[in-house]
Image: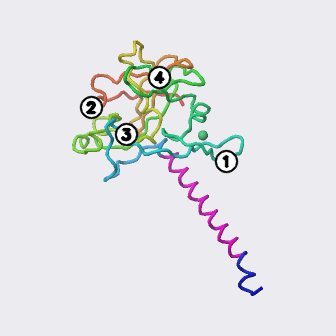
Amino acid sequence: MSEAEAEQPIGRRVKQRHGQQQQLQQQQEQRAAATATATTNTPLAAGGPAPDARGQIDVGPQRCVATAKATSRQCERLTQHGCHCTIHRAQLDGTCIRASSVPGAGKGLWAATRSFSPGATVARYTGDLVRTAARASNASVAASRYVLQLSATLSLDAARTNTADGRMVNDARGSGQRPNARFVVDLRSQTASLCATRTIRQGTEVLVSYGRQFWSSHALQLADCDG
Ligand SMILES: [Zn+2]
């Protein structure tokens, strides 16, 4: 055996280890980015994809960011919404996303594994921050059906499917039910969340009233929200 041959396996092992480290680092970066997207807002980036016919930007499936109890490692399931898979959404957030009880509304957000008391946070509402005045002139934002106006000057576009689950809530209109939640805006931190206005029992769909001017010029009231 030549010296070169004897060294080859060691070289290969080093290379393999380096590859594994790189893969792990990439996974960690993706996990951190997915968590940030579902929990914080970012300024609208120029040149992003436009919403589809349903007014949303489908970013495709991504890996759940939760830690699986059995392995103490990152969950390997994929999700089409937010950053948690169906199991971790139910376990950690107490909610699920499934067919809405509102006719023609598609999917909706439900209280799955627990009830929410009045004032409790049901989900975050995150997305791209955009100047309210610039909304109409921005083709992407104008086509989005997920724009929440935070103030007269600032709006939040949750068109991307990897933003928080609050985007999945439907208006109660047409369901024969009363709204049981509302959006609460914190202008200081420029964030919004979905809060229960009355008890939302386990197995009930979370419903809001978008209001006449919602998605257009509705300035939401600043209020306290638990959690
Ligand atoms: Zn998961």
Residue lying at 47% horizontally and 22% vertically, measured from the top left = 206
State which quadrant residue 131 falls in. Answer: top left
Q: Is residue 1 magenta?
A: no
Residue lying at 42% horizontally and 18% vertically, measured from the top left = 179
Left or right: 219 as drawn, with respect to 178: left
Looking at the rendering, the stretch of residues picked out in magenta corresponds to 10-36
Numbered circle sitting on residue 149: none
User: Dot 4: within a 10 Å radius of its alpha carbon, few (fewer than 14), some, or many (20 or more) residues?
Assistant: many
Residue lying at 44% horizontally and 23% vertically, measured from the top left = 100
Residue found at the far left of this picture: 137
* Residue type, numbered disc 2: Ser
Question: What secondary structure is found at the residue carrying circle 2?
Answer: loop
* Residue type, numbered disc 3: Ala
Q: Main secondary structure of the magenta part?
A: helix
Numbered circle sitting on residue 73: 1
Numbered circle sitting on residue 159: 3
Rendered position, 118 above or below 17? above
Which numbered disc, 3 or 1, marks the residue that appears first in the sequence?
A: 1
